[in-house]
Image (cartoon, rainbow, N blue to C red):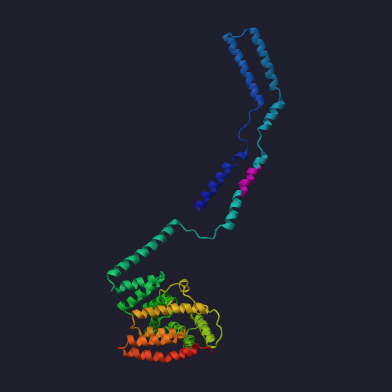
Amino acid sequence: MLLWVCFAILTAAVVALLLRPLRRADTMPVEPAAADLAVYRDQLRELDAERERGLVIESELESARAEVARRLLKRAGDDKVVASSRDDTTSHPRAQRIYLAVVALLPVVAIGLYLVSGSPHLAGHPYAERQAAEEGASSVVALIAKVEERLREHPEDGRGWDVVAPIYLRLGRFADAAHAFAEANRLEGETVKRLLGFAEATLMAENGIVSEAVRRTALRVLELEPQRIEVGVWLALAKEQDGDLAAAAAGYRELLAKAPEKAQWRSAVAERLDLVTKKLNGENPGTAPKPAAPEAAAGNGGPDAAARDAAPDVAAMSPADRDAFIQSMVERLAARLKDNGKDAEGWIRLARAYKVLGRDQDAANALASARENLADDKAALDQIAKAEQSLDQIGKEQSPQ
């Protein structure tokens, strides 16, 4: 407020200085009559001085004095000239009116322009607060750097991973957050909070695609806390993305049946169920909203809504864009399995993705590669055999109704 008062005083001073010539005449003009009288009086004094010095004779002095006195009397009696000279010294009323009008209108016009084109509704941002915010951001960066340096020296420090994981998640470093949560779960033990953080970070890192790691994490959360039914959204969404629409619809229905009436995620599940039902009936579902991450994850250090909205809406894509997106995800999964082929569930997921894309031969090759890499794991071979039996069913569900 004090700043605005200072601005107002400064503006008034500048306006007054600029408009000073309009306020009144710059100088008071000298009256002609007064000037002439002063000259004549000086002439009389000069004549007296010359007489004292003996420079003029008495007869010439008297004649000169008489002439000057005559002029002096004549000028002193000229009332019209004196009155006219006094009129010239009066102020200018029109200039004063202009001065007052400008002084009054200038702040009014300035305020009007500010209200129209300015932003008077914005809150103030004192320098101290802005400096504190910048220092706070710098301190967070410095803290993360210190933790990362310690973790490079002591990678088995589970507490450090547990501290930095939610920070990565809030900063949008989803891949780093998923790795940190995974390390914290491994070293400090699994908790629901850490599992949900890992699942959400992985989901965001994969652009909204429910990977096998997310699916396993959701199942583990249900083992630890069966009442966390909202993580079933991930399980149903995984089935939908794999093309198992019937199973996805059943999962969404089960969630709606168990969900509390006031659960915020009910509407998202209902929308997904409606979309899947239309697909099963051969209808064009149009553009559907993408599923929100479970409320539980958001309440345990998950990213904000703006971060979740960054995930692409696969269902809303055009067929060509959707196929291109899925192809890129499949290629990434295939490249990962090529480097590490000991992931049975990853091979099964790759085979299902190929089946959804109509690449039956690639699906068969993926299962063959899985058997080759997991030849010494009987449980994994049984799992692959069951998955192979379900591939034909997926093909039937993907065919037009």
* Residue 102 belongs to magenta span: yes
Residue in front for this viewpoint, 48 or 118: 118
91 versus 180 height, above or below: above
- Where, by quadrant of the figure, is residue 171 drawn? bottom left
Residue 308 lies left or right of residue 138; in this view the side is: right
* Residue 335 belongs to magenta span: no
- Where, by quadrant of the figure, is residue 299 drawn? bottom left
Expressed as whole percent of the image width and height from the top left, the position of residue 384 reads 37, 89
Whether residue 33 appears in this view of the structure is yes
Q: Residue at x 53, y 78 (%)?
A: 318
Q: Residue at x 69, y 27 (%)?
A: 82
Expressed as whole percent of the image width and height from the top left, the position of residue 35 reads 64, 24
- Where, by quadrant of the figure, is residue 389 drawn? bottom left
Residue range (magenta): 97-105
Main SS, magenta residues: helix
Q: Quadrant of the C terminus?
A: bottom right
Residue in front for this viewpoint, 196 or 234: 234
Expressed as whole percent of the image width and height from the top left, the position of residue 118 reads 56, 57
